Image (cartoon, rainbow, N blue to C red):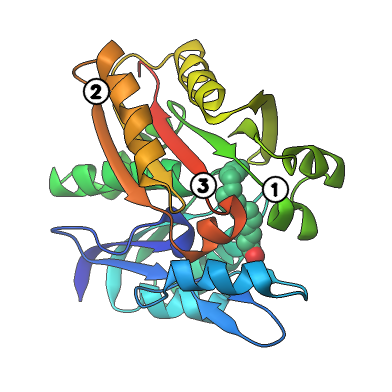
């Protein structure tokens, strides 16, 4: 039996985690014709190309309780990070699975963390859990530690299209219509309730990057960890990283691609930026 394991759903955009038992439970993207399981072998670029020409409805589906239970199996202490409960049923399914798992195995524990976010911010939470487990903190200290840390991490996004978010009822159609205009990018954040909050509508990529940086600073960023997750947009992610490094040479920045779920909603060109405030 494993002593510790970190389990997350595929919204955190991580496929592997070094040195620690780790599993990701996939969300799914579905049309009437095809299903994309958000796993290591999904070709995200091909999925986006297919969806761009597909005329019918497309939607996502979160993991069910059974799928979460399978990922918890044979572990004494599980830390589980889910996409925000404000936009998905993933957290609820994981919480039910956790209760069931602890009822069947009285000596085992599962702590489910509602990220109230996704992607790059969830990945920061997972990195922190990893560090605390490797430092051999107790289960209760890790629970306390991650609660504290989560109060100091944030998520911003810059999106060129809100089409899939609006079609699936995650953002108002009116906002989405505006974002669909050529050259307009919507900059927003994960709200305290874990929903999308629109902060600014900018014209042009340059202004969107400046808005992201200004928002980070206004929110207390001062050179800590940053993760930039991009949907098929490495050059803009690198551009943002350079701007951050110019102001904060010590900044610890990781750039990574979004997996299928975040790519479906962020759409081509989209950026998700997770960062720490001054802690
Ligand atoms: O349960 C499901 O089917 C999943 C639903 C997920 C819906 C939203 C995913 C958003 C992904 C878009 C920009 C970041 C918004 C963050 C707000 C908390 C990425």
Do we see residue 73 in this rendering?
A: yes
Residue placed furthest toward the right: 174
Residue 140 position, x and y percent, is: 32, 44
Compared with 38, 114 (above or below) is above
Residue drawn where x is 25% and y is 63% of the image: 16
User: Distance between the Cα atoms at labels 1 and 3?
Assistant: 12 Å
Viewer-side label of 1, 3: 3
89 to the left or right of 220 = right
Residue drawn where x is 61% and y is 55% of the image: 265
Which disc number belongs to residue 251? 2
| Quarter containing the C terminus | top left
User: Distance between the Cα atoms at labels 2 and 3?
Assistant: 24 Å
User: Distance between the Cα atoms at labels 1 and 2?
Assistant: 30 Å
Q: Which residue is mark 3?
A: 269
Image quarter of residue 62: bottom right
Asked if ligand 1 lies within 8 A of label 2, the reply is: no
Compared with 23, 13 (above or below) is above
Viewer-side label of 2, 3: 3
Viewer-side label of 1, 2: 1
Which disc number belongs to residue 162? 1
**Crowd class of label 2 (few under 14; some 14 to 19; many from 20; radius 10 Å):** some
């Amino acid at each position: 039996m494993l002593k510790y394991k970190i389990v997350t759903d595929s919204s955190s955009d991580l496929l592997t985690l070094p040195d620690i038992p780790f599993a990701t439970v996939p969300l799914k993207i579905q049309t009437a014709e095809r299903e994309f399981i958000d796993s290591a072998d999904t070709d995200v670029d091909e999925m986006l190309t297919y969806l761009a020409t597909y005329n019918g409805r497309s939607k996502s589906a979160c993991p069910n309780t059974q799928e979460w239970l399978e990922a918890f199996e044979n572990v004494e202490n599980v830390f589980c990070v889910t996409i925000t409960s404000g936009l998905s049923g993933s957290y609820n399914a994981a919480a039910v699975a956790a209760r069931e798992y602890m009822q069947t195995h009285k000596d085992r524990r599962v702590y489910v963390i509602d990220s109230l976010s996704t992607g790059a911010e969830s990945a920061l939470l997972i990195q922190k859990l990893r560090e605390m487990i490797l430092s051999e903190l107790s289960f209760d200290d890790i629970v306390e530690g991650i609660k504290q840390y989560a109060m100091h991490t944030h998520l911003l996004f810059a999106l060129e299209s809100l089409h899939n978010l609006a079609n699936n009822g995650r953002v108002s159609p009116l906002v989405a219509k505006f974002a669909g205009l050529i050259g307009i990018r919507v900059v927003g954040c994960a709200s305290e309730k874990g929903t999308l909050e629109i902060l600014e509508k900018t014209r042009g990529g340059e202004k969107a990057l400046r808005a992201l940086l200004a928002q980070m600073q206004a929110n207390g960023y001062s050179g800590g960890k940053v993760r930039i997750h991009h949907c098929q947009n490495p050059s803009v992610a690198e551009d943002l990283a350079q701007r951050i490094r110019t102001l904060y040479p010590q900044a610890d920045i990781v750039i990574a691609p979004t997996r299928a779920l975040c790519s479906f909603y962020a759409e081509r060109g989209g950026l998700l930026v997770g960062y720490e405030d001054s802690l």
